[in-house]
Amino acid sequence: MKTWKWFATASALALSLTVAQPSLADVSIDDIVKDAETTGDVVSNGLGPQGQRYSALKTVNTGNVAGLVPAWAMSLGGEKMRGQETQPLVKDGVMYITGSYSRAWAIDTKTGREIWQYDARLPEGILPCCDVINRGGALIKDKFIFGTLDAKLVALDAKTGKVVWTKKIDDFKAGYSYTAAPLVVPSEKHGPLIVTGVSGGEFGIVGRIEARKADDGELVWSRPTIEGHMGTLNGKESTMTGKKNATWPGDLWQTGGGATWLGGTYDPETKLIFMGTGNPAPWNSHMRPGDNLYSCSRLALDPETGEIKWHFQTTPNDGWDFDGVNEVVSFDLNGTKAAATADRNGYFYVLNRENGKFIGGYPFVKNISWAKGLDKDGRPIYVPENRPGNPTKSKDGKKGDSIFAVPSFLGGKNWMPIAYSKDTKLFYIPSNEWGMDLWNEPVTYKKGAAYLGAGFTIKPIFDDHIGSLKAMDPATGEVKWEYKNRAPLWGGILTTGGGLVFFGTPEGDLKAMDAASGKELWAFNTGSGIVGSPVTWEQDGEQFISVVSGWGGAVPLWGGEVAKTVAHLNQGGMVWTFKLPKQTAQKN
Amino acid sequence: MGLAPAVSCLSFLVLSVILGSSSVGARPLDDVTASGVLRVIVYDDFAPFSWTAPDGSVMGIDADIARAIAARMKLQPDIIARIAGEEVDDDLRSNIWQGPRTGGHVGDVMMHVPMEKQFIARNTLVGISNAYHHEKVVLAVHPDMVDPAAGLSAFRNAKIAVQFATAAHYFIMFADDEAYKTSVNPFRKIDAAVASFLARENAGVLGPRSEIEALLGDKRSSVRIVEPQFDTDLRMAWTIGTAIKHDSRDTGYAVGKALQELESSGELAAIFKSYGVTRVAPPVP
């Protein structure tokens, strides 16, 4: 394994030898589809395409987790210490991670030594909205694929870190970037496909989902997320998304928004891709009466054609910036093929994943103000007074009436993924209890011209905490336990067959909780805030747990009361890997 | 800027230590003068005010004014075109007081900054002054399609183009009890809105005077430009000035002096005219 490092920096002669390296097998599409069942590797975002973030491993368990110690740590180096939102991938003794500023590494999982590092050459003046983060890469065949802040998809040779192909997702000069972990799905007609959305983009850009061939990055299909726009398949127009003007007035569908900035999941049983869509544009909902499909929705797509098989809209006619991008996690609900998703808007939805029908929905944060609840179809029962007003009907002559809405637009849950335990049959939801004052702000300028902006101030709901990790029963909506954290939670969850829930805090702790009771069993401070997602795998009979530490993301960019909970946190950039000392592990 | 960001960043640190000054931070007038270069940030992709030509040079009214300012200050101009962020407040952070999040310099001066009192008050880390142009939302119409004298009311039954999500867009969507809502044709960019107007797909276009004038070009004479009265709290007219970092006021004063000279000599109006735009003097506050 040590030799790879040497190969990566050596001559063409050395490179030719790497072909014969037997221990580093290609990642097949079957490896990805079955990732949840193979505890020796992590070859997909979500520890399996369904995104449950569950590992059956139980070497580390409730009885011995208190003895967990660091096995190694590796610094991401440089001055580029910013938010690290990646989820490591592990295959054949090599860990693959991405980092801030569009960087990627391969690391020896035994020693923590770097095998290769790739730095994307970013153009000056790119403007990613919410820190210079990256949420992870994808492995397929002999490649490691990830997206860059200047909106490119880069495929690296997994052995050497050298670029195999690069595809432009869109023009960074129009404000596009790419930060999500690409999704790899099987297809009968096209072979393995890389599925991505788009991040950012100028006001009024329409979101879309795209599938490319893993071998060369060639575009296979594209599916716009707003009704009225045409999709493509094999370079030709395919079908229209929805029905033009069905839920949008006039010509506003042309500039409808619905960005797809977070990655998707895939369910091998129904052979469907699940992807969420962002808020509609422009932000003030009085401009666009109607449901504004398919903004703030979950879409189920056919990997062969990119056709939408079903949709479920969480916030019709959104007026609060409640993006609907959150991950859809497939699970079995007493024999029903179900899926669950925890929305920005504060509700946890359980759907039938074969047809998108609503099964149940429950608030997972407290004091939700914008809706009284959900009706029998899962549609919100709005509180009309809590919708930001018509911008031309302001009373004080300066700005529209301010409303206080809960949750804030950063969401009951933001990007950080939930987890589902097959053992406890509970979902673990990293949430935040905060609201926002929200008003029409006429004193807003964009590129030297007057706009109508949204003025906002984000405020905590409770004195002692914003972050809240909840264990929720998807059958009843009952919260079985809650862990409260002073700073907002911004990292993903891992749960294991050892009865444990792992997650990180902005204060820097990686914590292990009893999955059944919520009792804290172990914590280790990593020295900087954790906003990434932990993983676990088994190697040579030992169970390892890894997380990338490094404070950043969107939270530090906002001021007000929230800033007080995070102002003292230090930057970082370190991969931490833990295991039990051999003697402790053998006691079981 | 051919160096990798990490390398250029490092060399800057080294330089700062050697020179005993902060090169990436503010540049008061003495430092600017000593360097011999005035670094000016303008918007990219923002015709007629500023854009990058295919050969890499920065063109436009703001770029030319910046060059003329540098000449008056006996400095070499370094004109940098940057893409716009979500709001001008973000651009001030990237271009004047903090620098771009992904690396790169701040400028000594940023052009085309709006000068409203509330906006100036909330951007405490910059100094915004030196008004050099007044922008106003106007209505251009095809006189054979709608009656120019009818103003906006002509668009109860005729289509009107507008740039998406601007103050003008919000205004026309709600004005006169939403009488025009179904007539409004939004475009992401003003050039597409004007192109659609010139193609007679829309009988009118509502937007900032300078951009509309420049985009109409020689077809200006075949259309009518009117200035409707807007009864709204939305901003339909605003003054344009420059921004400097708050601790480099003397640079701002020198820029202001140069701008005054350019105005009295007639150079300022001539620059606007060369791009087909009427320069409107800012109202005296």
Image (cartoon, coloured by chain):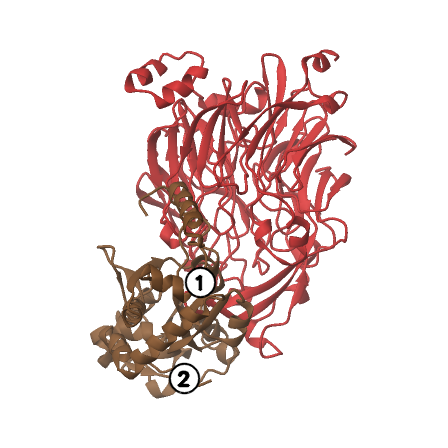
Chain colours: A red, B brown
Chain bearing tag 1 is A
Residue in view at x 50 percent, y 59 percent = A247
Q: Which numbered marker is on residue A156?
A: none
SS of the residue under disc 1: helix
Percent across and percent down for residue B14 are 42, 45
SS of the residue under disc 2: loop
Residue in view at x 54 percent, y 19 percent = A111
Percent across and percent down for residue B114 are 44, 72
Look at label 2 and name its amino acid: Pro
Residue sticking out furthest to the bottom? B149
In the image, which is nearer the foreground, mark 2 or mark 1? 2
Please say whether residue A10 is visible from this viewpoint: yes
Q: Nearer the viewer, residue A202 or A491?
A: A491
- Tell me how many marks there are: 2
Please indicate whether residue A524 sits to the left or right of residue B194 in the image. Answer: right
Mark 1: give few (<14), some (14-19) or many (20+) Cα within 10 Å. many
Percent across and percent down for residue A228 are 41, 55
Q: Which numbered marker is on residue A252?
A: 1
Residue where numbered disc 2 is placed: B228
Look at label 1 and name its amino acid: Leu
**In terms of image quadrants, where is residue B65?**
bottom left
**How many angstroms separate mark 2 from mark 1 (CA)?**
24 Å
Q: Nearer the viewer, residue A179 or A271?
A: A179
